[in-house]
Image (spheres, helix red, strand yellow):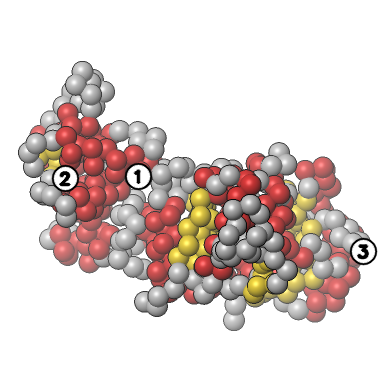
Amino acid sequence: MKPVICLIEDDPIMGEALVERLEMEGYGCDWFQRGRDALLPLQHKRYALAISDIRLPDLSGEDLFVELQRETPALPPFLFITGHGAIDQAVRLLKLGAADYLTKPLDIPALIAKVRELAGRHPAGGEGEPRLGISNAMRRIEAMLPRLAKQARTVLITGESGVGKEVVARTLHELAAAGQKEPFIAVNCGAIAESLMESELFGHERGAFTGAVKERRGAFELARGGTLFLDEIGDMPLSMQVKLLRALQERSIVRVGGEKTIQIDFRLILATHRDLKKMVEEGRFREDLYYRVHVVQIDIPPLRERREDILWLADRFLAEFAQGGGVRRLDADAEQWLIHADWPGNVRELRHALERACILSDGPLLTASAFTDAEEKVGAGEAAPTLAAHVAEAERRHILSVLAANHGRIAETAAQLGISRKNLWEKMKKHGIREAGADSIN
């Protein structure tokens, strides 16, 4: 039987979003919008955890907690949600026996981590062939996608510019479509003038404004039955945020200049490189919309934090470019240069650098000089790597590749490499490879 959480939250948007996310994580959830409605259930039902807002319409979360302590001998752990101005009250609740508290606007990943800690349940991971990368971070993301494709209707993808947010979005869409021809409509909110955004998203009727010579369907209608991908959602003006929230809540739109309500059904994936929580605090992003779109968040780390993906990605890009010309490959110095570069533009910058090198190089072998200016030394002035260093890096790449193919299973990886598990562990330690779950394998 799955653990059940008691949620006490009077805000309908936030409550609905939290219920959806908790159920997706494998928990049952009883949601109450008034404190007194939760009294009897908390006294007579076995909950793994109680999550309660401190400010409730009928009594405070503190009063509810104190009354329950007085009447109920065994309470579940209590996790309180509070505004910044009520932290002193939250601290008082900790002294009374509450498990912990979180402040608004909620950091959903932090909330889920705390729920897992307090309720004692961890979601099962999935497996799949590497499509996004061979690093642990990207494999964990990829393992999440099949489950999200089946259950999630709203997903927020965050990360620096160029990390591959749209690639993750398209992968999620393909998994959800399961081979069916469903539309994938991508809209970059940062590239549309504010005056045109409403028409782009919702469409317009003929004669709605000067130049509207015929009716036009917007992105919401075009995505019906498929996926709508709103990139750079953090750049959407506040006036449009209100209209987006209404469309998401009602699952319907009205075209510009129209009166007819059009029902819509789609999967929504949003992406941003901005810190939406900070924008909420600064009043630049609506709090109610934040909770509505922040049901599930996928955070993609920058390329400099997952360097084992660099050469894996480079091989894929070079294979793509080879379709239009000759096959290119990297020499040892070029590999070392790519691995040690910072890549502030992330995967997008890596792709452009490889494409430029292919265009400007005459032969099939790409050297480090293809990626640097004429006066720039390989590795920003560092000495070229020794043969031993190159061999060690090749060994590390091969181990990572075989680990990825075997989904991190140590015994199978060691057998395929022709070495013992102990030898494999020693090599992983030497190369700084930490496989998810590896510490639990003897």
Q: CA distance from mark 3 to mark 1?
A: 51 Å
Q: Secondary structure at mark 3?
A: loop
Q: CA distance from mark 2 to mark 3?
A: 65 Å
Mark 3 vs mark 1, foreground winner is 1
Name which residue type carries label 1.
Answer: Val
CB-based contact (under 8 Å), mark 2 and mark 3? no
In this picture, is 81 found above or below 328? below
Residue at the spot 27% in from the left edge and 49% down from the top edge: 313
Q: Residues within 10 Å of mark 1 (few under 14, many from 20)?
A: many
Which image quadrant: the C terminus? Answer: bottom left
Q: CA distance from mark 2 to mark 1?
A: 21 Å
The label number, if any, that marks residue 347 in the structure image: 1
Residue at the spot 41% in from the left edge and 62% down from the top edge: 170
Of mark 3 and mark 1, the one earlier in the sequence is: 3
Q: Residues within 10 Å of mark 3 (few under 14, many from 20)?
A: few
Residue at the spot 47% in from the left edge and 42% down from the top edge: 160
Instruction: Quickly name the residue at label 2.
Output: 394
66 or 296: nearer the viewer? 296
Q: Secondary structure at mark 2?
A: helix
Residue at the spot 60% in from the left edge and 50% down from the top edge: 196
Instruction: Quickly name the residue at label 3.
Output: 58
